[in-house]
């Protein structure tokens, strides 16, 4: 491990405006989810090709993975490619698919060192061969890891996920394995790509957009949202701390009354 191996060293020297004493390390969200947006605009504003924005976005993701491990987050999920992203120009889709494969191979040592287990949300069987094979290899290679789970949403769409869950439940009913009265919330959750994972408690969206873009519609029922104008390539460990400190300041009521109110 390097000299950034502990929380104290990784978060040493915070920039002005970040008060580490405001962070309650006993109340870190179990599952943080990132909608990584703004790579293209980041690049365009610098006169660079969009692909450079995606490359810079990968560097950010690497930092956020390490930061979440240092913070003892249980699950970090990230929206890398949606079912709608296939409609981007073919050259950008090809570049993204190639970058995913290349990055994944490059980052395997990091995932091993940090004991990170990777899972995919979405239909990775439909990805180009290179990317699919690298992802399948990564799944196998990290399956035994016992630290943080990194859930990468690739070829993911929440409506497609819910339709798939309904289909799978219907198949079990048709096969006589399940009675329709047994289809409760847990049964639906059990057929989602996120089965077995806690729901996101904090969803971060970068680049200021105020929308969910077909992401984890079921799972974010009670999540807190943190939207920052920062483009994803500029989102770093300190921005993440800002988001967590904001989350810790929220009054989460889950439809009930405030925990701080008497009645
Ligand atoms: C959004 O920016 C970002 C993406 C479509 C892809 C992001 C993917 C990564 C950062 C890396 C993921 C890595 C692996 C290994 C899966 P945008 O292009 O929508 O930006 P714009 O809204 O400014 O155009």
Image (tube, rainbow, N blue to C red):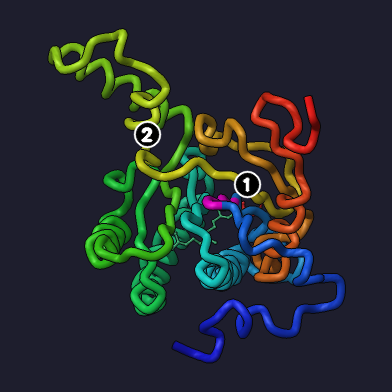
User: Picture quarter containing residue 14?
Assistant: bottom right
Residue 189 vertical position relative to residue 113 in the rendered view, above or below: above
Look at 70% across and 32% down and name the residue there.
253
Residue 207, percent across and down?
73, 53
Q: Considering the numbered disc 2 on the image, is that residue within a helix, a strand or a loop?
A: loop
* Label of residue 235 in the image: none
Residue 22 vertical position relative to residue 121 in the rendered view, above or below: below
Q: Is mark 1 within 8 Å of ligand 1?
A: no
Residue 32 included in the magenta stretch of the image: yes
Could you tell me which quadrant the N terminus lies in? Answer: bottom left
User: Picture quarter containing residue 10?
Assistant: bottom right
- In the image, is 156 to the left or to the right of 224? left
The residue where tag 2 is placed is 192
* Label of residue 203 in the image: 1
Q: Is residue 91 in sight in this rendering?
A: no
Look at 32% across and 59% down and name the residue there.
131
Q: In this view of the protein, which residue sits in the foreground, 111 or 154?
A: 111
Per the picture, the main secondary structure of the magenta-coloured stretch is strand
Residue 113, percent across and down?
37, 79
């Amino acid at each position: 491990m390097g000299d950034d191996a502990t929380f104290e060293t990784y978060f040493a020297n915070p920039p002005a405006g970040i008060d580490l004493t405001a962070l309650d390390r006993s109340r870190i969200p179990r599952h943080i989810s990132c909608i990584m947006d703004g790579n293209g605009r980041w690049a365009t504003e610098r006169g660079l090709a969009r692909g450079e924005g995606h490359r810079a976005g990968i560097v950010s993701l690497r930092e956020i993975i390490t930061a979440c491990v240092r913070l003892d987050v249980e699950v970090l999920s990230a929206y890398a490619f949606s079912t709608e992203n296939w409609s981007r120009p073919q050259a950008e889709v090809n570049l993204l698919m190639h970058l995913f494969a290349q990055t994944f191979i490059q980052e395997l040592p990091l995932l091993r060192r940090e004991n990170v287990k990777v899972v995919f949300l979405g239909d990775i069987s439909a990805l180009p061969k290179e990317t699919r094979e690298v992802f399948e290899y990564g799944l196998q290679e990290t399956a035994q890891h016992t630290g943080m789970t990194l859930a990468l949403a690739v070829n993911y769409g929440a409506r497609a996920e819910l339709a798939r869950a309904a289909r799978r439940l219907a198949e079990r009913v048709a096969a006589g394995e399940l009675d329709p009265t047994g289809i409760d919330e847990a049964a639906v959750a059990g057929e989602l790509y996120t089965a077995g994972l806690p729901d996101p408690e904090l969803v971060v969206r970068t680049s200021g957009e105020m929308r969910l873009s077909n992401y984890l519609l079921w799972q974010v029922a009670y999540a807190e949202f943190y939207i920052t104008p920062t483009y994803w390539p500029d989102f770093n460990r300190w921005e993440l701390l800002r988001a967590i400190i904001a989350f810790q300041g929220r009054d989460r009521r889950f439809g009930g009354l405030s925990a701080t109110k008497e009645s």
